[in-house]
Amino acid sequence: MVQVRVKEGLLEGELTEDEIGGKFYSFRGIPYAEPPLGDLRFKPPQPKKAWDGVRDAKEFGSVYYQINFHELDAGPSGSEDCLFLNVYTPDIKPERALPVMFYIHGGGLVGGSGNDDMYGPEFLIRHGIVFVTFNYRLSALGFLCLDTEDIPGNAGMKDQVAALRWVKENISSFGGDPENITIFGHSAGGLSVSYHLISPMTKGLFKRAIVKSGSFTCPWGQTFEPRERGLALARKLGCYSEDDKELYEFFKRQPIEKLNGMQLPITFSEKGNKAYDIIFGVVDEKDFGNNERFIFGDVIEKLRNGIHEGVELVMGYTEDEGLIYMRNAISMEEMCEYSNEFLQFFVPKSIAHNCTLTQQFEVGRKVKQFYFKDEVVTMDNLKELVNYFSLTMFTYPMFQLARSCSLKNKVYFYKFTGKSERNFMVRILHLEDFVGEKIPVCHADEINYIFPMKKVNLKINKNAKSFKIIDHFTKLLTNFAKYGNPTQEGNFLLKWTPYNINEQAYLEINENLTTGFKPDKIEIDFWENIFKEYLPQSIPY
């Protein structure tokens, strides 16, 4: 047993020994805010009150109520009382304070947690860093917005800020350096990190950031008509009032299980295209005079003006991001039919929301011609649809973020192409027949080389190719957290050159690391020209 003192009181953790991570101390289930229950539902997190005696920190706290993506038959689990974090450290009293890596989990803002069934510390902590994970409010309780003082939105993002503030204040008790914190996340976690780069609430709370396969520049990164989405949820639950106080009292009374897992289309396009999308997300908060706002105003304009000064960045994407859209949410046959019937299928959401119908048809024709020439979309050429989803939903938006940030901040850019038995998303999505013998690099496949992924039972073989990729990736990321230079330390035979808007240098990460320039140039140039012509105001540089 081991004890540390934090602001709220004493914590008792334990010493863990693992064949991969070695010996490290773990402190689990630490409350970083008061439970957001009752009148605190939808409200910003409140500071945790001090406790008497010693608080046990050997078990994880409850995760947010959710249906497990990997175990759909298991039913929902979790609780509204979910604001807990976990700290793992190789040394509580090191000679020199250790760099801190603060991970924001993904899951579409509806699922996931910071527990070690998915995000264990073993691969990272062996490189001499302090590792922190945490839970935050998700779905409606984290992101419902009625544009009112009672439900202003962004509660889940303010949870993230509260956790980061707690770490800044207390991490020295675990051997961590509060002046050297790297925040990082994947997918909705990457989206979150990108917002923290411009939020006034997070300025000065971190030194570096890693943005993986998600950004507010993505089509799913900004919330469209959040109040209408909230009213749609109310109607679905039987409340047709539009009175602000009645709506607040109604939502406050609803059991948590009724506020999660619903599809809430508010446009014809959303109704027809059932591909995965974020329902509730980050919003432009209104000013009520006494509220601390997470984000407000035009985020693209904020990005043009520059992210937090001095923050260094790593960002990147995987080879086959768009494969995630082939999941069972819509059958591939239906997707083919829909894409052949409606040119608007190929129109990015931001263009659909801001351009005339005539312009949308023009864009749809150009995109369909680019990817499918004059062919009908069928099961035989559906892989081009994967490429379309990859570029529109992830890859091109990540380039937009990188280009903009690189004008004033140091950016390292990567493309992950590692292939081994750890690329498990195809099995999760039941797409083995679709991809055949080829091992793809789907959205989320790269996180399996950063974390052990106990839940999906990925075996670890130190002699396998997969472990070489694990070594590469985790060393690059932890080097960055330590020094701001991913290839500064270790047996790297190359130098990862920072990205700039002209050369666009990048690192391809797999079993063998290689450097290059302008990845996916043909498709990136195509989408750049589309947005320059039809929606130039969305380009952040």
Image (cartoon, rainbow, N blue to C red):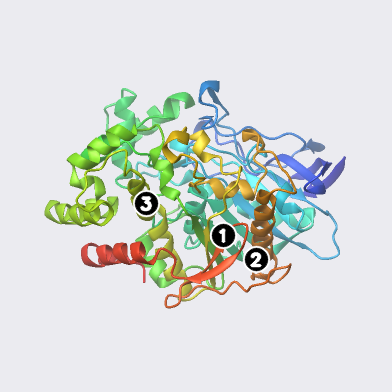
SS at mark 1?
A: strand
Can residue 301 be spotted in the picture? yes
Amino acid type shown at disc 1: Ile
Residue that sits furthest to the bottom in the current view = 502
Residues packed near mark 1 inside 10 Å, few (<14), some (14 to 19) or many (20 plus): many
Figure quadrant of residue 29:
top right
For the C terminus, the quadrant is: bottom left
Q: Are marks 2 and 1 in contact (CB under 8 Å)?
A: yes
- Compared to residue 497, the image places residue 162 above or below, namely above
Rendered location of residue 139, percent (x, y): 45, 37
Ranked by sequence position, the earlier of labels 2 and 1 is 1
Identify the residue at horizontal 19%, vertical 51% (top origin): 374
* Residue 387, disc: 3
Residue 152 lies, in percent from the top left, at 40, 45
Q: Residue at x 19, y 47 (%)?
A: 343
Looking at the image, tell me whether mark 3 or mark 1 is earlier in sequence order.
Answer: 1
What distance separates the C-alpha of mark 3 from that of mark 1?
24 Å
Which residue is painted at 57% across and 67% down in the image? Answer: 514
Q: Secondary structure at mark 3?
A: helix
Whether the residues at callouts 3 and 1 have beta carbons within 8 Å, the answer is: no
The residue carrying pointer 2 sits among few (fewer than 14), some (14 to 19) or many (20 or more) residues within 10 Å by Cα, namely many
- Vertical side of 4 occupied by 359: above or below: below
- Residue 256: x percent and y percent? 48, 27
Q: Tell me the kind of residue under disc 2.
A: Phe
Identity, as a three-letter code, of the amino acid under mark 3: Asn
Alpha carbon of mark 2 to alpha carbon of mark 1: how far?
Answer: 9 Å
Q: Residue furthest front?
A: 437
Counting residues from the N terminus, which is met first, the one under dot 2 or under dot 3?
3
Residue 55 percent across, percent down from the top left: 78, 37
